[in-house]
Amino acid sequence: MPLKLDNLDLSKHVIILTGATDGIGKEMARILAGFNPKRLILPARNIEKGNNLLEYIKSSNGNANNVEIWEMDLADLQSVKNFANKFINEIGELHILINNAGVGVQSRVIKTKDNFELQFQVNHLAPFLLIWSLLDTMKRSVSAELPGKIAFTTSVANQFGEIDFDNLNLEKNNYWHPFKGYGNSKLMNIIIAKQLGRIVQSENITTCSIHPGVIHTNITQLSSPFFTSLFKILVKITGAEITAEQGAINVLYPVFSLETGNYYNEGIEDEPNKIAYDQEIAKKLWDVSEQILKDHGMI
């Protein structure tokens, strides 16, 4: 039976939702805006698409009160740092951070301006930088009465993933495999959610990672026509596709639970790749990610 959300009062919550201009993020933004958030900040790489999102929310909900579009590009680490600094200076409180933005399966290696493989940066490193930059702000904002939440939209593709600390940026010869690269980054989401949950376990903050379900959205826009067509065929054969609205609900449902570090499949607790339970790997991934960002002058 599809999950449903109860009516929520978010009038005390400051929320950041990334990846809100398309797909399930667009529906999450609409749903969250309808629950009267204190402030809902929607980072967008393309401001025009951000403004179109505002109009969509207004037409759906009647207004977009307290909803703001801020510029941020996860493929540019300086952009993420600038966003975080602006947020700290201008708002200074945070209760919910939903890391929904991401890129899908890539048919070839694409490098960002920071010289990282695109999936590694957009799906892992940049969200990690955003969390790292805003974590102290969230700690100061939350309480037992108003707890915080940090969530990741991930994928069942985490089951294909592995963590090779000598090849996080996918630069070894003959390594490239599109599903592996994507799966690696989605596994990293789950590992970081679990490690972060341990770090903040006494801070009134919980974490989670969620596979929303199979949805054909713009997540495939950078993939080759072959992979896009293959995706459509597999979905048609299996009948597994759900609507963007249901995918949004599947993500938001665990966000408002009090469990921490858990992985959810379509809103139901599930078992991820067994690597996600290795605490030594989790700590190392956290430490290595920090060091990479330090080496690039981001933290």
Image: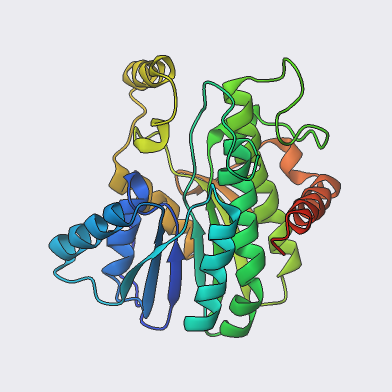
The vertical placement of 123 against 236, above or below, is below
The vertical placement of 293 against 278, above or below, is below
In terms of image quadrants, where is residue 11? Answer: bottom left
Point out the residue furthest to the front here. Answer: 113
Q: Identify the residue at horizontal 31%, vertical 19% (top origin).
A: 236
| Horizontal and vertical percent position of residue 233 | 35, 15
Answer with left or right where residue 238 lies relative to residue 120.
Answer: left
- Taking depth in this image into account, of 4 and 56 the one nearest to the observer is 56
- Taking depth in this image into account, of 24 and 202 the one nearest to the observer is 24
Q: Quadrant of the C terminus?
A: bottom right
| Horizontal and vertical percent position of residue 53 | 25, 57
Point out the residue furthest to the right here. Answer: 280
- Tell me, yes or no, if residue 79 can be seen here: yes
Give the colour scheme of this rendering: rainbow
Q: Identify the residue at horizontal 29%, vertical 68% (top origin).
A: 33
Q: Identify the residue at horizontal 74%, vertical 36% (top origin).
A: 168
- Tell me, yes or no, if residue 91 can be seen here: no
Answer with left or right where residue 29 lies relative to residue 160.
Answer: left
Q: Identify the residue at horizontal 41%, vertical 83% (top origin).
A: 12
